[in-house]
Image (cartoon, rainbow, N blue to C red):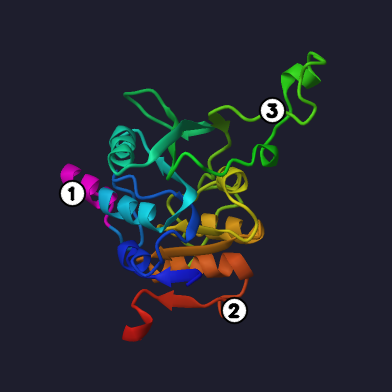
Amino acid sequence: MEGIYFGNCLDVMKRIDSGTVNLVATDPPFNIGYSYDLYKDKKGYTEYKNWCTEWLLECKRVLAPNGSIYVCIGQEYAAELNVILKEIGMIQRGWIIWKYGFGVACKKKFQRCHTHIHWFSKSQDYVFNADEIRVPSDRLLKYKDKRADPRGKIPSDVWDFPRVCGTFKERIKDETGTVHPCQMNASVIERMIRVSSFVGDLVLDPFCGSGTTASTAHLLGRRFITCDVSESYCQVAANRILGDKNSYKICPSKSDKDG
């Protein structure tokens, strides 16, 4: 069932066997009015929370016993999603702050220069490949401290990566030249995948968007499942992964029995 699926995430995830996904890494709609292709990013407060509970429950069901989930979310609903993940029985491992220097300009409040990332595991036995994500430490490079680990240090829970802004050359466009409104930085997803999965594992992103999770998983030798209600976004992801819009199959969301 690996691949890119055109359809509602709840319909697609219901087709995935329980306990078969090793990692969920996703950047869902923030419910703040983004202008997506088809999805209306402005549900009522209770409606949005209930919807998040639905898809997070499905994520938990399909996760392997040692699996993890990373959910990126804005400040408006960061607290609510944290509570939902706890209420459905997931175990909190970290509340990560993704810090980016080029924030959103504001006139009557502080400029927003970060996104929240909730990291939860399904059990006490979870994958954490520390050596895959080590970074150089000041203790070793700057202060020449002999006590420093020569392999580098495990990063802190503040991740310093830039946003992929609208003018950046890395911005992914569809066939009409339109860019996705909120393309994820692949470096953020890469860290999640490296630390919480192994080569050959299955990575799920219920909200395909510009295809960052799927394409990064593919490059890192992981299998993937992703989906979107926008056929255009699915096509962008397919093009991004293999470079040829005809070389990667986009699957329907209906069951094989339904055709």
Image vertical order of residue 183 relative to residue 86, above or below: below
Residue 153 lies left or right of residue 65; in this view the side is right
Single out the mark in the foreground, 2 or 1: 1
Asked if 174 appears above or below 122 in the picture, the reply is below
Please name the amino acid that badge 3 sits on.
Answer: Lys
Write down the residue under mark 3.
153
Describe residue 151's horizontal placement relative to residue 170 as left or right.
right
Separation of residues labelled 2 and 1 (CA atoms): 38 Å
Task: State the image quarter where residue 209 is shown.
Answer: bottom left
Q: Which label number is shown at residue 47? A: 1
Are there few (<14), some (14-19), or many (20+) residues within 10 Å of tag 3? some
Closer to the N terminus: mark 2 or mark 1? 1
Comparing labels 3 and 2, the label whose residue is closer to the camera: 3
Q: Earlier in the sequence, mark 3 or mark 2?
A: 3
Residue numbers of the magenta segment:
40-52
Residue 8: image x %, image y %?
Answer: 32, 66
Quadrant location of the C terminus in the rendered image: bottom left
Q: Where residue 81 appears, x then y in whole percent?
A: 31, 39
Q: Is residue 83 above or below residue 186?
A: above
Please state which of residues 49 and 91 is positioned toward the viewer in this rendering: 91
Q: For numbered disc 1, what is the local secondary structure?
A: helix
Residue 50 lies within the magenta run: yes
Q: Foreground residue, 220 or 37?
A: 220
Q: Is residue 205 left or right of residue 33?
A: right
Are dots 3 and 2 in contact, CB under 8 Å?
no
Q: Is residue 34 magenta?
A: no
Residue located at (17% from left, 44% from top): 46
| Residue at position x 43%, y 48% in the image | 27
Q: Is residue 36 visible?
A: yes
Amino acid of disc 2: Ser
| Residue at image mark 2 | 247
Q: CA distance from mark 3 to mark 1?
A: 42 Å
